[in-house]
């Protein structure tokens, strides 16, 4: 299904490759040391990510599909796809910045005022990194239940409340926040979407340590945090459409980076080296992992093919999200099983510097982050299969009269 | 409004072709007709339907070139037709004749291959008989040896699990030179169904709409296809192509299973709501869709690789077969569960699809066989890569 590059695309690919070769190193086949999740290592990784973003910006690659007016290249989704494919062969620090750009950038271009759009170039340069202040202790899957309050004082919005699971809030310069500006109307009608400065008194960030040992998300406490009224996107109480638009930007799955250290092929290599490939059950489980990897790639190619034809993706993004998460975890568990007793070790003492153990522990961020697998299954049922929604009790009542667990 | 699944990777022309076939099978082979054949005798064959399908629609020779009397289309078109057979459970030997026999004969070649393909295109159904009592799908496991008497070749022994046997006018039998092993000495031989020493035993089959048979040969006269000692590569290519095409047929049935379950979940009310509004059922439906999307994507990739002679043809056939088999069985199981009590009555069609899903998951190798093959193929490819 994946067609060959056209001559123009091939030329573009060559241009990308030459630039990457001049500016980055190819990925290595082996980890030299275990993955380091210490705060110091994460701070270094953050700086490296900003530097790489800046390098890409200067090369004109920071956002290929964005208009030139905002610092983009004015290119096509196909060109972005080609760039992502080529970039995945190089050892470059992407990840959070790309995800954050992919979420807030399109939302600002679609709903932002001209003044708000002035943030876009600094975002692309990596000078100002943005975090997404959405989830709260009482608003997880039910995001429209946010309680963080915003009230207007003169020409400012004053914000009080708590956010949680905020990725990289400890490093971010700016944030986009979903908050309640009117509790007297049904919940979706009293929500605003605002841009705030993270470097101000009243913003207190406390990292949360995941079971994997990383600190990539945080609790954020907001006490009398202020932002100008003209930093509200799409108007007071009109933030819900902006929020759902932001969540729908699932472009992250396209051209997703595949880490060559954690593929089924790497598992087959190591089983061959240890002699375990002689066991039928080993061949079966590795064959299954390999087949799943290819099927996932074929599904991604289908999305790419729709982009190439200028159509909406013809396979629902939630299918990919669920399979990436479930199969990714099962593959990592199979890899540790393949290590036998050594699978009980981790870090430098485990085979391959514990890269598979690290993958096993990354399950939560795949299966919960970006919407739980259950929320995605609801989406598939209701969106793709048009099944009726659950009866709801929160559509027409004022937000302040709704039941909560807290 | 019933759920309608959008096709993917189909041009306008191919979509039109699919629509024509869907209407044809809905009108000419509704499930009542499928059941009539199923309950009538043990042949699993509707000769009149096959006559119309092959003579008027040209399905028997769809992937055979025009100068041999076929339609001159490719494996993608054949896969579309097989998908509609899988959807309707139509009792015709399209898979046995066009996919299994047709592809193996075409790949083995030789001076008689054209005449055999011409006859397949004309609707004279054929099938492939190779598996023996040991149940191993690998042609290297064939033990039947040929007996040469002067210029004549004769075959004696049994071939098991033959699909489309009662419709076949001709059997293509895999046998070997006396004393040979594995691929060396493997050969393909044609045997006329009405020849002396040929008998067919119908088997009581789990898949009621596609019964299997045993082919008993007792000194039956056989004719070699292709050249002596050169048949093995063609046999393997043909079987890989047939495997890819089988997954396309399976996906046709899975689409019907998905639509039936989701339509039922949307219409059936309990506790004053459609049961599809309950997450317990909605999530099952979502899982059906996930299995379906992965399967049809893998089947399409395998068929396209075969159609284009891609070097990854074998690999992608095994990716598809190992994935689609268990997915199809899960879908048929859960679709039946969503339909509750009626889902396991004789009268409802769910069990017919369940039976087909189980049999097709085994046919041409189950998932463990294909997973093992994948691991070996990838390992040897890595070794070759390292050697270069």
Image (cartoon, rainbow, N blue to C red):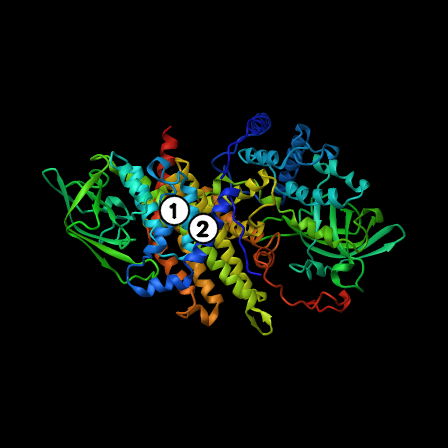
Crowd tier of the residue under label 1, counting other residues whose Cα lies within 10 Å: few below 14, some 14–19, many 20 or above: many
A135 relative to A202 in the view: left or right: left
Numbered disc 1: secondary structure: helix
State the image quarter where residue B375 is shown.
top left
Looking at the image, is A308 positioned above or below residue B295?
A: above
* Residue ID for mark 1: B59
Between discs 1 and 2, the one toward the N terminus: 2
Where is residue B39 drawn, in percent x and y?
33, 66
* Depth order, front residue of A269/A242: A242
Crowd tier of the residue under label 2, counting other residues whose Cα lies within 10 Å: few below 14, some 14–19, many 20 or above: many
Badge 1 vs badge 2, beta-carbon distance below 8 Å: yes
Residue that sits furthest to the right in the current view: A154
* Residue ID for mark 2: B21
* Depth order, front residue of A65/A45: A65
Q: Residue at x 33, y 37 (%)?
A: B68
How many angstroms separate mark 1 from mark 2 (CA)? 10 Å
Q: Is residue B93 in sight in this rendering? A: yes
Where is residue B308 drawn, in percent x and y?
42, 36
Where is residue B282 drawn, in percent x and y?
55, 63
Q: Residue B342 got which mark? A: none
B23 relative to A364 in the view: left or right: left
Numbered disc 2: secondary structure: helix
Looking at the image, is B356 positioned above or below residue A29?
A: below
Where is residue A201 drawn, in percent x and y?
80, 49
Q: Chain of mark 2?
A: B
Q: Is residue A275 in sight in this rendering? A: no
Q: Quadrant of the C terminus of chain B?
A: top left
B75 relative to B115 in the view: left or right: right
């Amino acid at each position: 299904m994946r067609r060959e590059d056209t001559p123009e695309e091939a030329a573009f690919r060559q241009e990308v490759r030459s630039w990457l070769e001049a500016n980055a190193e190819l990925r290595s086949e082996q980890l030299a040391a275990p993955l380091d999740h210490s705060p110091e290592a994460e701070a270094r990784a953050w700086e490296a990510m900003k530097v790489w973003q800046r390098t890409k910006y200067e090369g004109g690659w920071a956002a290929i599909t964005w208009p030139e007016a905002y610092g983009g290249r004015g290119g096509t989704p196909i060109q972005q796809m080609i760039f992502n494919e080529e970039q995945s062969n190089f050892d470059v620090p992407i990840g959070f910045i790309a995800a954050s750009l992919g979420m807030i950038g399109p939302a600002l271009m679609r709903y932002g005022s001209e003044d708000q759009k002035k943030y876009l170039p600094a975002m692309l340069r990596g000078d100002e990194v943005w975090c997404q202040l959405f989830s709260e202790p009482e608003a997880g899957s039910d995001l429209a239940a946010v309680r963080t309050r915003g009230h207007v004082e003169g020409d400012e919005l004053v914000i009080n409340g708590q956010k949680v699971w905020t990725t990289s809030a400890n490093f971010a310069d700016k944030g986009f926040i979903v908050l309640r500006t009117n509790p007297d109307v049904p919940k979706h009608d009293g929500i605003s979407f605002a841009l705030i400065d993270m470097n101000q008194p009243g913003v207190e960030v406390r990292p949360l340590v995941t079971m994997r040992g990383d600190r990539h998300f945080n609790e954020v406490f907001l006490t009398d945090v202020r932002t100008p009224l003209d930093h509200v996107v799409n108007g007071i109480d009109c933030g819900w459409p902006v929020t759902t638009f932001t969540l729908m930007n699932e472009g992250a799955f396209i051209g997703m980076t595949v880490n060559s250290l954690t593929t089924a092929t790497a598992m087959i290599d190591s089983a061959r080296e240890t002699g375990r490939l002689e066991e039928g059950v080993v061949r079966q489980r590795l064959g299954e992992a390999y087949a799943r990897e290819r099927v996932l790639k074929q599904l991604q190619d289908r999305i790419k093919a729709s982009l190439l034809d200028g159509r909406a993706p013809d396979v629902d993004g939630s299918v990919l999200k669920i399979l990436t998460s479930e199969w990714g975890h099962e593959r990592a568990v199979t890899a540790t099983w393949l290590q036998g007793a050594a699978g009980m070790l981790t870090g430098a003492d485990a085979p391959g510097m514990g890269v598979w153990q690290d993958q096993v522990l990354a399950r939560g961020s795949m299966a919960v982050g970006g919407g739980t697998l259950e929320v995605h299954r609801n989406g598939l049922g209701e969106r793709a299969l048009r099944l009726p929604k659950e009866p709801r009790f929160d559509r027409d009542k004022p937000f302040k009269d709704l039941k909560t667990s807290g | 409004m019933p759920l309608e699944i959008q096709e993917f990777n189909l041009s306008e022309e191919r979509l039109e072709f699919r629509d024509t076939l869907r209407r044809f099978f809905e009108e000419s082979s509704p499930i009542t007709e499928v059941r009539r054949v199923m309950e009538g005798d043990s042949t699993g064959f509707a000769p009149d339907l096959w006559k119309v399908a092959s003579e008027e629609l040209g399905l028997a020779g769809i992937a055979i070139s025009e100068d041999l009397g076929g339609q001159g289309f490719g494996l993608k078109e054949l896969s579309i037709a097989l998908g509609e057979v899988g959807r309707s459970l139509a009792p015709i030997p399209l898979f046995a004749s066009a996919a299994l026999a047709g592809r193996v004969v075409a790949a083995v070649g030789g001076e008689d291959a054209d005449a055999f393909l011409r006859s397949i295109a004309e609707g004279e159904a054929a099938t492939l008989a190779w598996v023996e009592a040991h149940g191993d799908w690998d042609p290297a496991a064939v033990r039947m040896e040929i007996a040469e008497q002067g210029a004549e070749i004769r075959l004696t022994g049994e071939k098991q699990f033959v699909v489309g046997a009662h419709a076949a006018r001709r059997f293509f039998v895999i046998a070997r030179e006396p004393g040979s092993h594995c691929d060396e000495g493997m050969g393909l031989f044609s045997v006329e169904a009405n020849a002396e020493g040929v008998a067919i035993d119908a088997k009581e089959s789990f898949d009621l709409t596609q019964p299997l048979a045993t082919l008993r040969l007792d000194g039956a006269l056989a004719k070699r296809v292709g050249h002596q000692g050169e048949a093995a590569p063609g046999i393997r290519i043909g079987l890989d192509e047939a495997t890819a095409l089988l997954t396309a047929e399976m996906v046709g049935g899975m689409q019907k299973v998905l639509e039936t379950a989701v339509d039922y979940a949307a219409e059936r009310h309990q506790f004053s709501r459609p049961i599809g509004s309950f997450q317990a059922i909605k999530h099952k439906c979502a899982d059906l869709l996930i299995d379906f999307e992965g399967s049809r994507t893998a089947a399409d990739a395998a068929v396209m690789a075969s159609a284009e002679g891609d070097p990854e043809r074998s690999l992608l056939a095994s990716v598809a077969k190992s994935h689609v088999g268990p997915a199809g069985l899960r879908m048929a199981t859960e679709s039946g569960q969503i339909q509750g009590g009626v889902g396991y009555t004789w009268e409802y069609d769910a069990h017919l699809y369940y039976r087909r899903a189980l049999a097709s998951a085994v046919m041409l190798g189950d998932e463990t066989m294909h997973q093992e093959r994948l691991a070996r193929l990838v390992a040897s490819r890595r070794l070759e890569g390292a050697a270069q």
